Amino acid sequence: MKTKLRVLAASVGLFCVAVPAVAHHSFEVDYDRDKPIEVTGVVTKVAWTNPHMRVYVDVTDVSGKVTTWNFELASPNTIIRNGWTRNDLKPGDKVIVKGFAGRIVESRAILNRITTADGRRLLSPAGAGAPSDTSGR
């Protein structure tokens, strides 16, 4: 009986470790490295949530139509370790965002770099497989 209980406990332990690894996705599943984007707009929301931080930006096209872009970043912990603070980006800030559009919903994208109106550049280590922004522009 003790052997069965140990096997059951070990199985449950392995399952608990494996589930988070299976649940995470790669860059290629959601985003397309062949669809680089650059948009200018106004931040409407900054969500410091796990497992990925998100920034929502309203972008107005030439005809006046407003599209809300949903930009995914790394985890808040990773973003903070890369120099961001919670005061760096606020609703109402005008920004230029570079990243890669989504495969299915093009207004859902992964963020590589965001430039604020005062010229500050905030980089995002976007995640596994995401192309990095090494252009310096």
Image (cartoon, grey):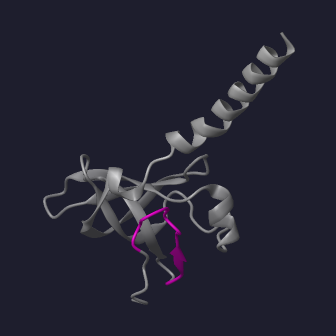
At x 49% / y 64%, what residue is drawn? Answer: 126
- Residue 6 falls in image quadrant: top right
The answer to whether residue 65 is above or below residue 1 is below
* In the image, residue 83 lies in the stretch drawn in magenta: no
Quarter residue 101 falls in: bottom left
How many numbered discs? 0
**Residue drawn at (67%, 74%), measured in percent from left and top?**
83
Q: Is residue 9 left or right of residue 100?
A: right
With respect to residue 35, does 52 lie above or below? above
The magenta-colored residue range is 119-131
Give me the residue at 60% from left, 55% from top.
Answer: 75
Question: How far across and how far down the image is residue 89, in percent?
Answer: 57, 65
In this picture, is 97 found above or below 107? below
Look at the magenta stretch and give its main secondary structure.
Answer: loop
Q: Residue at x 64, y 73 (%)?
A: 82
Asked if residue 32 lies left or right of residue 10, the reply is: left
| Residue 128 included in the magenta stretch of the image | yes
The quarter in which the C terminus is drawn is bottom left
Q: Residue furthest left?
A: 63
- Quadrant showing the N terminus: top right
Q: Residue furthest right?
A: 2
Q: Is 105 in front, or is 103? A: 103
